[in-house]
Image (tube, grey):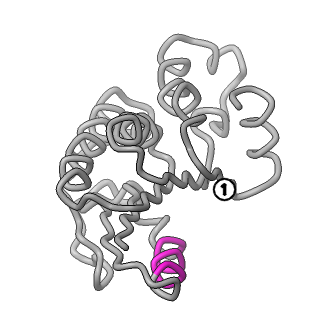
């Protein structure tokens, strides 16, 4: 059996390593994808963990920007081109980026793959801005990339009970 594990954030890779090891212990052949762009440093990186494939992501300079959302959206589309070629039995998506959830939904609808979505953080809900700002259209669209599509998961994992409660109450 084959599993694909993916994320677009370098900061999620430690968790990703644990997921990969766990799946391998269960007998899966695991393919993993990450990004070659560091969200923290806003630069391309060459410190890709062994065994992971880094795909090119478009650079951006600001965390709150159209460029960032475009970069994540493009990365999600590009990584799912790879996933389609891998034809996994299990797909494990570590989010954010919310666009990965949207593309996972599309892939699941096409193939029926078993899908696990692991929510590490909730953007834009966790942003340190007012709820008035979070209610603006760009933030609603950003959130919808996850909230509209998350219910397709066969299993939802959240980093904390608060995220589980928010998702369960609002979207599931």
Using the image as rendered, state which of residue 96 and residue 64 is in the foreground. 96
Q: Dot 1 surroundings within 10 Å: few (below 14), some, or many (20 or more)?
A: some
Residue name at image x 24 percent, y 38 percent: 74
Residue 169 x/y as whole percent: 80, 30
Using the image as rendered, state which of residue 111 and residue 160 is in the foreground. 111
Residue 145 x/y as whole percent: 47, 29
Q: Quadrant of the C terminus?
A: top right
Residue 133 x/y as whole percent: 62, 17
Residue 147 x/y as whole percent: 58, 29
**Residue 134's image quarter?**
top right
Q: Quadrant of the N terminus?
A: bottom left
Residue name at image x 35 percent, y 75 percent: 30
Identify whether 166 is placed above or below 75: above
Using the image as rendered, state which of residue 34 and residue 3 is in the foreground. 3
Mark 1 lies on residue: 157
Identify whether 35 is placed above or below 104: below
Residue name at image x 64 percent, y 50 percent: 156
Tell me if residue 21 is in the magenta stretch.
Answer: yes
Using the image as rendered, state which of residue 172 and residue 46 is in the foreground. 172
Q: Label the magenta part by its dominant secondary structure.
A: helix
Identify whether 74 is placed above or below 11: above
Identify whether 34 is placed above or below 156: below
Over which residues does the magenta segment extend? Answer: 15-23
């Amino acid at each position: 059996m084959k599993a694909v594990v993916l994320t677009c954030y370098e900061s999620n890779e430690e968790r990703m390593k644990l997921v990969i090891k766990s799946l391998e212990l269960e007998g899966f052949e695991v393919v993993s994808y990450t990004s070659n762009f560091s969200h923290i440093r806003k630069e391309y990186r060459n410190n890709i963990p062994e065994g992971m494939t880094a795909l090119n992501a478009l650079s951006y300079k600001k965390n709150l920007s159209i460029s960032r959302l475009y970069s994540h959206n493009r990365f999600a589309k590009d990584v799912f081109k790879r996933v389609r070629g891998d034809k996994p039995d299990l797909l494990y998506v570590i989010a954010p980026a919310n666009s990965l959830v949207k593309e996972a939904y599309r892939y699941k609808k096409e193939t029926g793959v078993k899908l696990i979505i692991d929510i590490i953080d909730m953007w834009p809900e966790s942003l340190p801005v007012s709820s008035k700002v979070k209610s603006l259209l760009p933030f609603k669209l950003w959130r919808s990339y996850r909230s509209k599509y998350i219910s397709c998961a066969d299993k939802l994992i959240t980093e904390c009970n608060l995220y589980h409660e928010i998702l369960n109450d609002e979207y599931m």
